[in-house]
Image (tube, grey):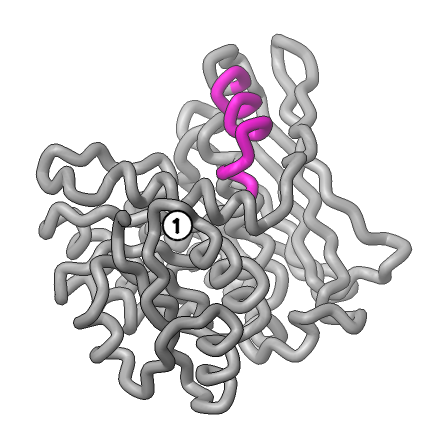
């Protein structure tokens, strides 16, 4: 048996994706569950035949790694505690709501030689991973357009009553997914311009190091008939469109577990994962700058937020 892994969180995503993948994974021992609601914790633990914990620190003490499916601010605090206890981390996106918090997690993971993987769902699709590798290698891209116009908060989806999604919107929920496929091809973001549009849509213009410019449209409240997801890169090599992932979230999370297992135990010899906590911190830097640009109605340098 491989790593002993505990799950922090009891919501829909924890139950249907993370818990299901942990329970089925051949090289991970799913030890137990902790959540903020005792009844839901017991129900999820019973579903997968694992222990229900009333104390998150007790669960952290009993495992080698934690998978976290909690709101980003709650996740950030729990992840830092787990890292300080020497536990490997399998985090959801975004890692945190502030660069101070995401940077602290990344630094602790690096300092202790831990494995840290952030579950950017599309990045764990072999089809998308190969596309990004080939597209980045081709080079010559002038920019990209990305649209993630979802209706999760305007329908009866499992996320419709998520408080943090209702407060933070598409920028913080869909934005990490979009950035996870734009940054590997176009490079780091240096400046962000943001504009608010109808249906609580956030429109971003990102200036990437090297000169490329990308535009993003992000919302969780699009009319169902107007919902779409599209990523298009353009440049001297023509146009390249991101393919469909071709797999369900449970399969993707199983691949994330594989990645965590491959990194765990290597200590100082471990190579930072391409979807590691350092990359998770880079994504939060862009999101924080975008939120500030929306507030100020101005262009904001990435990494220059004053909070």
Residue at the far right in the pictured view? 225
Counting other residues with Cα less than 10 Å from the Cα at mark 1, is it few (<14), some (14-19), or many (20 or more)?
Answer: many
Residue highlighted by disc 1: 118
Whole-percent x and y of residue 282? 36, 46
Q: Residue at x 78, y 73 (%)?
A: 156
Question: Magenta segment range?
Answer: 122-135
Number of callouts: 1
- Position of 94 compared to 173: left or right? left
Residue 188 pos. (x, y %): 40, 35
| Residue 125 in magenta stretch | yes
Q: Quadrant of residue 91?
A: bottom left
Q: Main secondary structure of the magenta part?
A: helix
Identity of the residue drawn at 46% across and 88% down: 37
Decide which of 251, 222 is in the foreground and name it.
Answer: 251
Residue at figure coordinates x 74%, y 69% from the top left: 157
Height in image: 139 above or below 283? above
Quadrant in which residue 264 is drawn: top left
Q: Is residue 227 left or right of residue 128?
A: right
């Amino acid at each position: 048996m491989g790593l002993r892994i505990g799950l922090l969180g009891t919501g829909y995503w924890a139950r249907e994706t993370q818990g299901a993948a942990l329970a089925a994974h051949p090289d991970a021992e799913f030890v137990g569950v902790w959540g903020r609601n005792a009844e839901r914790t017991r129900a999820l633990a019973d579903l997968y035949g694992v222990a229900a914990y009333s104390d998150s620190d007790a669960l952290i003490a009993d495992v080698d790694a934690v998978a976290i499916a909690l709101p980003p601010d709650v996740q950030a605090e729990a992840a830092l505690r787990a890292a300080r206890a020497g536990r490997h981390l399998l985090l959801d996106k975004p890692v945190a709501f502030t660069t101070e918090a995401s940077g602290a997690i990344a630094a602790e993971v690096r300092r202790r030689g831990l494995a840290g993987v952030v579950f950017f769902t599309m990045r764990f699709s072999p089809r998308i991973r190969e596309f990004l590798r080939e597209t980045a290698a081709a080079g010559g891209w002038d920019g990209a357009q990305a649209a993630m116009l979802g209706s999760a908060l305007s329908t009866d989806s499992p996320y419709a009553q998520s408080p943090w999604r209702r407060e933070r919107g598409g920028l913080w929920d869909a934005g990490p997914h979009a950035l996870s496929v734009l940054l590997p091809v176009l490079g780091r973001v240096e400046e962000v311009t943001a504009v608010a549009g109808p249906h609580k849509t956030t429109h971003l213009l990102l200036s990437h190091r090297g000169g490329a410019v990308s535009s993003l449209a992000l919302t969780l409240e699009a009319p169902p008939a107007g919902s779409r997801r599209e990523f298009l890169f353009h440049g001297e090599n023509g146009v390249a469109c991101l393919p469909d992932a071709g797999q369900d979230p449970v399969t993707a999370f199983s691949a994330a577990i594989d990645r965590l297992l491959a990194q765990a135990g290597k200590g100082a010899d471990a190579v930072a994962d391409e979807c590691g906590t350092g990359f998770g911190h880079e994504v939060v830097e862009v999101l924080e700058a975008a939120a500030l640009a929306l507030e100020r109605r101005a262009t904001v340098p990435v990494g220059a937020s004053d909070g």
